[in-house]
Amino acid sequence: MGEWSSFTAVVRGLCLLYVTNKYLGTVTITYGPSMLPTLNVTGSMLLVERISTRTGKLRPGDVVIFRSPETPRKIVCKRLIGLEGDQITYVVDPLSGDRCETIVVPKGHVWVEGDYIYNTKDSRNFGALPYGLLEGRAFWTVSPPFSLGFHVTSIFIIWSSFTNQLFFFSAGSYCLVKILDP
């Protein structure tokens, strides 16, 4: 009887983890220069909530994660610039000139761009992104990632309302959490 109750508890825990990850939120790690200076090149850990994309509560300026329209197995992180019906003016190729184009984001699509326009693949390359490819909205970034190891036994948390940041202190290390939501 004890073996089945342990097995049932593990299965319930895994189901809860799946539902939380699929429908409520997740943790993701980003790499690359396209979101400089907001996110690190060597990796930033983001806390992502999935409710805003399902309820349509996204707004321009949000940092979002989505499935790449070019490589669907790849998850990408960019800034949401415009929603359907918005008029967007963008620099076509910032490396070779300052020629601009203006488009209206089609129905059921959004416009996303990386913060570092000189090294990013975004809507300027693949066009407006279908809304169905959005996976979630990042609301916290933790840097440096992995600074809170499993060996830590005591953690002190300090909230700075002036800088809108959380500081996690442990023996010999600290971790800074920035809130991305303005």
Image (tube, rainbow, N blue to C red):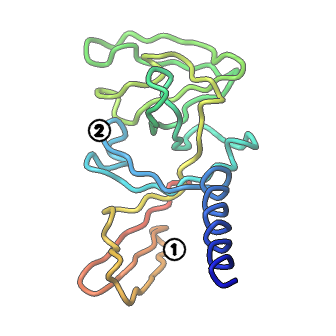
Residue position marked by numbered label 2 in the rendering? 33
Q: What x and y, as percent, mark residue 84?
A: 69, 24
In the displayed structure, 9 sits above or below 115; it is below
Mark found first going from the N terminus, 1 or 2: 2
Residue found at x 37% / y 69%: 176
The residue at 29%/28% (across/down) is 119
Label 1 belongs to which residue? 161
Circle count: 2
Q: Which mark is residue 52?
A: none
Q: Is residue 182 visible?
A: no
Viewport quadrant of the C terminus: bottom right
Query: From what the image shows, is residue 145 above or below residue 126?
Result: below
Q: Is residue 105 above or below residue 158?
A: above
Residue type at tag 1: Ser
* Alpha carbon separation for disc pair 1 and 2: 29 Å
Q: Position of residue 82 (x, y in %)?
A: 60, 28
Residue at position x 70%, y 20% in the image: 85
Q: Residue at x 51, y 43 (%)?
A: 63
